[in-house]
Image (cartoon, rainbow, N blue to C red):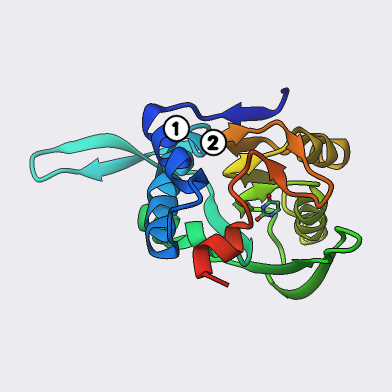
Amino acid sequence: MKGVTVITHPLVRHNLTRLRDRHTQPQEFRRVLSEIAVLLLYEATRSFGVRRRTVATPLQRSTGYQLQREVVLVPVLRAGLGMLDAILQLLPNARVGFIGLKREESTLRANFYHQSLPRDLRRFEVILIEPMLATGGSAVAALDLLATARARHVRLLNLVAAPEGVRCVHARHPGVPIFTAALDQRLNAKGYILPGLGDAGDRLFGV
Ligand code: URA
């Protein structure tokens, strides 16, 4: 699908299968999700801009690079937390905002319960971390918030996407690239991704 990068690295596939496995317990699920988050981030940041800078090695001056923009990571609570620490290992200077959204089971609508973001996101690379892109309701609500905070350079880091969610996101935010480990078949009647991995928050935290 246009605007979606499915990361098919063998380590990603291997780890995603462990996450899908219903027998994988929360402790292992957390560890594997952290491992896969690093691999996904590596691909998702490939197009980050860099600027040249001079660096003095112990031997001579040379030309090097630095990231063009500061980074803000925005995990969507709860499941986004499962990828945050690992990503911070690679981007230790990143700022972290949070968006709390709870899906209402009867309507599948996303309700806000928390938001903390830098006021003006224009100059930042923003990585929205939403592991499960199901109906797309939460991702769109989060992207709306980021747009209100004037974010210009946003990408969505995802683990498993449903085609319905991708279409929903791109209908409202066509310029936002999506990076995912899998584009699954479809949603079931309760809005769960098939085959998916179940409720990512529950799998992570055991409740
Ligand atoms: N959220 C999840 O955690 N899993 C799904 O399958 C859909 C939404």
Quarter placement of the N terminus: top right
Question: Observer-nearest residue: 36 or 200?
Answer: 200
Q: Is residue 55 above or below residue 99?
A: above
Q: Position of residue 198 (x, y in %)?
A: 62, 52
Q: Is mark 2 within 8 Å of ligand 1?
A: no
**Does dot 2 land on a helix, a strand or a loop?**
loop
Q: Position of residue 184 (x, y in %)?
A: 66, 33
Q: Quadrant of residue 156?
A: top right
Q: Position of residue 57 (x, y in %)?
A: 15, 43
Task: Report the residue at 84% width, 66% height from top.
Answer: 104
The circle drawn on residue 13 is 1
Is residue 165 shown left or right of residue 97?
Answer: right
| Mark 1–mark 2 distance (CA, rounded to whole Å) | 7 Å
Q: Quadrant of residue 76?
A: bottom right
Question: Observer-nearest residue: 175 or 60?
Answer: 175
Q: Position of residue 158 (x, y in %)?
A: 60, 45
How dense is the environment of label 2, judged by Cα within 10 Å: few (below 14), some, or many (20 and up)? many
* Contact check, label 1 and label 2, Cβ < 8 Å: yes
How dense is the environment of label 1, judged by Cα within 10 Å: few (below 14), some, or many (20 and up)? some
- Mark closer to the chain start, 1 or 2: 1
Amino acid at circle 2: Ala
The circle drawn on residue 181 is 2
Is residue 97 shown left or right of residue 31?
Answer: right
Quarter placement of the C terminus: bottom right
Q: Is residue 181 above or below residue 68?
A: above
Task: Report the residue at 51% width, 63% height from top.
Answer: 204
**Does dot 1 land on a helix, a strand or a loop?**
helix
* Identity of the residue furthest to the top in this view: 1
